[in-house]
Structures are given as C-alpha cells and as structure tokens.
Image (tube, rainbow, N blue to C red):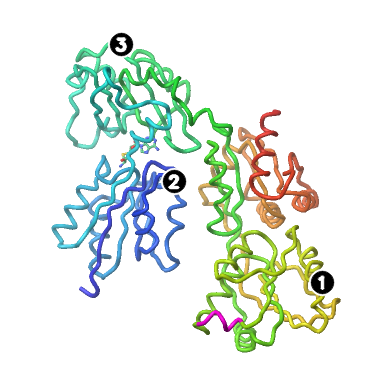
Amino acid sequence: MAESGMVYLVGAGPGDLGLVTLRARELIQRADVLVYDYLVHPDLVDWVRSRCEVIYVGKKAGFHSMPQEEIEALLVKHAEAGQQVVRLKGGDPYVFGRGGEEARALAENDIPFEVVPGITAALAAGAYAGIPLTQRNTSSSLMLVTGHEDPTKHELQVDWPQLGALKNTTLAIYMGMSRLPDILKGLQSGGLAADTPAAVVQWASLGRQRSATGTVSDIVARAAEAGLKAPSIIFVGDVVRHQESVDWFEHLSLFGRRIVVTRTRSGNSALRGKLEHLGAEVIELPLINVVPAVDRDMLVEVISELGMYDWIVFTSANGVRIFFEHFYQAFDDIRALGLLRFACVGDATAKEIERHRVKVECRPKVATAEALAKAMIATGSLDSAKIVTVTGNLNRDILVKKLEEARAIVDTLPLYRTEKLDLSENAAAHDFRERGADAILFASSSAAEAYASQADSLQLSEEAKQPLLGSMGPQTSRTLKELDLTVDFESQAPGLNALVDALISRLNES
Ligand code: SAH
C-alpha cells in the first residue's frame, strides 16, 4: 500500500444543500475520489477539487445501478491505492442505505474508514411537511421502516400486522410507494384504525417537494391524485393531524414554482440559494463551459513584466481565477503585483479579485464593456498608460478600442475559452424540455446570449409550461430583445434580491 488510503461513508442529507453537515462538506472538498448515487444533490459534486475523480454508481434512466459488490470492490481498490475516498449517500448512510454492508467490506479488507451521519429522509419530511414526529401524550415512539419496493429481492419481510397493533407510534415508511395498498392492509389487519391520519411526502426539503395528507382509508387515492411517487416517505400516525397548523415550507412565496437559472460558470449558486430558500424548485441549466486556453507566450511576457503595466482589466471571474493560478505559480509574494491597478466589471469578478485582498479601483455600476471603458477613462489616467486586459474568446473588442482611443497601450491576455455545452444528455435540460418552467431568470447579457445559442437544444415539448423571461436590468433586457426574446419582467434595481422581487410580483399577477 502506498500512502494510507481511507474511506469516508458520508450522509448527504435529504436533498437541500443547507442540510449537509460541515464534516461532509470538508471531506467532499478534499476527496481524491467521490463515489455517489441517485438521490444525492448534483451540486454537491461540484464541491470537489478539479483533480478529484467522480464516479456515479446510481440508477440512470434505463440503467441499473452498479451491483453492491462492485461498489464495495471499487471503494477497496481506491483506498488500497492510497486515495481519500468519499462514498456519498442520500440521507444517512446507515439508514436503509446499505452503508453497513460497505463498512463491513472495508473492515474485512483492513481499510480504515469513518462514518459521517446525515439527516435521514424521514426527519426532513417531518420538518418540511409540517409533521412533528413525536408529540407529548399522543405519540411517544417513532419507527423507521422499509416498505421494500422491490418484491423480487429476497429481504426480510416486515411484519405489518404487528406494527399495526402498536399504540402511540409514528410510522415513517421508506421505499413504500409501490406497495402502499398492501402495507396499509397489513397494518389494518393488525388493528390500525382506518381513520388514523396518514401522509405522503415526496422529494422532502426540495423545491419539488409535494405532499398529500388523509387517513389510512384514503391516502392511496389522495397520493395518486397529487401524482406522488417515489422517492417519498409515508407517515402513519396521529401526528399527521398537526400538519395544517405547523406547515411552513409549502407556504413559502415561491413554493410550487419551477424557476430556471442559467449557469454560465461553476459555483454560480447565490441566485439558486435565494430561490430555494423561498421554496422554489430551481433548474440550473448549464449552457456553457469555461475551459482554460492560455496564450503561453503572452502569459510569460505579461507575468515577467507585470511591473510595467499600470492597469489590469478583468471582465469575468474565470479570468481572475486563472490569472491568479498562474501568478502564484510564478511568485510567492502578492507584492509582485507592484502598483498594478485593478479594473473589472461585475459583482462576481470583483469578489474574486477581492479574495486576494486586492482592491478594485475601477468598476462601473453597469456591467458592460462600454461602461467599463468610460469609467476607466474617467480616472484620467489612461494617456500613455499600459493596460493588460484578461480575456476569453467572447470578449468584446469594443473595450480595447475605446481604451486605445483614450491613448492607452493595450495588450490582451487570452486565458480561457467559452464552449457551448452539449445538452442532449443533460438531465436539467431534459427536465426543462419535458416540463418547462414558470420563469427563466437572466442575470446577465452573456447568460441571455448563451441561452439563445442553445435554443435548438432547449425546444419545449407540447405539454411543457411556457416560461416567463425575467431580466436583471436594462442592459440584459436590451440583449434579450436583440435576440428576439420577449422580456416579461425586469428587475427594478441592481442585485439579485431585486430580480427575485420582480419575479415574485410578476408571478403573483398571473
Ligand atoms: N439513506 C437514505 C434512505 C435511502 S432509501 C436516508 O437516510 O434517507 C431510499 C428511500 O428514501 C426512498 O425510496 C424514499 O422513501 C426515501 N427518501 C430519500 N430521500 C427522500 C426525500 N428527499 N423525500 C422523501 N423520501 C426520500
């Protein structure tokens, strides 16, 4: 064995990203290998380092998941190669997640491991559907039980009549949807009253959460009416009575709404977070991919003569990120930047620069190349100034032209390229094509352009809901109109909060 490998069996919680533990996050961020399956929020996978190997072992449309023994062998293999392996599972790894089997396989192979608990689905379903799981005087025990959705598997059978005889107990049934009528019959034959309250909660904690409540005698019909399927938790017990009075999640202003946000770079999740906290189901469409594409000669020249420049200009956070990666490879002291002044457009770009404790001296209110040029000219420092602009392949020559008109000497340093992503196999795009959405939010002109460039891959099916288009501000609206897209609502002030406000008022109108 090389360096000693280790496996972490990590619970990813029920879905909502905020319900992941700090320990889980830390481990994901430093994993060499991440093994995950169905029911794990896809964004968690974005937390890994770029050199982490990501392996999906879950079910995919039309495919079965990887057999359990193979998963175990995979964990052992990578750990024996000295790697830090994170095995991520929905909910808690030891609650109906076969985590116990994986732990045993690791122990048998002398692989060191750690288990990180997660919030199991029943706890999330209770909290987010307004069902307290225990209640003084009426419900003094909680039972987590599996409904065994797959009767072809040889598993221990649950004694439903015996569970039906229990008093003052809340049952939380996992994997029970396809056998619900049988399960309820079994419970009733043990003595459970037909008027016992029952509920089904699908996709608990997520914006796509849906629930139905009723009694043992009508919950099957009510769940079917609401279109509920797996993954769901079925609750049976007196506590379901409290649902109406303590529900909070399903009353949020965007609950039940499907909102599309375009994703033009990884980690662009501030808007998503805001929408999800208001209960929305967010579909993040990845439209373009940013890949480093460095002009080596130019890079060497700029880095070795950094002191000669007066200004460095960034138009995207990607540019900042890639620039600093190279900068730190060349220098181990931030003072190598000398007196270089920083200019940029956009919140995200400025934030990325400020992470290095470097002040952005020039930044226009409006995020356009024209506004940036104007703001730089207004500093009165451009005559004969040497400027380097860090660019991608979509950058506007207009910036360079305007700066040169102001008699600056401008070098461009290409560091990345923006590519159109192939959306034919993408899950979010597929979901959008099939079901549409209530609205699409465009946070920038480049998002609008990326969306339009993908129009062919985003054709809605006939049943899909036609989305309203929302824009971040006048500039984005102008771009949308130029692209022949209608602007249904526009943010009244800068910032994401105003965009969300505009969305809510527009949705409330219709
Ligand atoms: N280890 C997981 C359970 C895995 S079994 C945990 O601790 O939660 C898979 C079952 O979990 C699903 O069939 C469903 O019953 C339940 N489940 C998982 N995530 C869920 C969610 N977000 N909402 C409702 N049920 C969920």
Q: Is residue 481 above or below residue 409?
A: above
Label 3: which secondary element:
loop
Instruction: State the extent of the magenta-drawn residues as a range.
Output: 333-337
Residue 194 bears which disc, if any? 3
Look at mark 1 in the image and give the residue it sits on.
377
Residue furthest out toward the left: 108
* Disc 2 residue type (three-letter): Gly
What secondary structure is the magenta-colored segment mainly? helix
The amino acid type found where label 1 is placed reads Ile
Identity of the residue drawn at 58% across and 37% down: 258
Residue 238 percent coordinates (x, y)? 32, 17
Q: In which quadrant of this rendering is ligand 1 seen? A: top left
SS state under label 1: helix
Q: CA distance from mark 3 to mark 1?
A: 77 Å
Tell us which disc is closer to us: 2 or 1: 1
Residue identifier under label 2? 18
Give the alpha-carbon distance from disc 2 to disc 1, as whole Å. Answer: 44 Å
Q: Which of the 4 image quadrants contains residue 148? A: top left
Asked which secondary structure carries label 2, the reply is helix
Amino acid residing under circle 3 = Ala
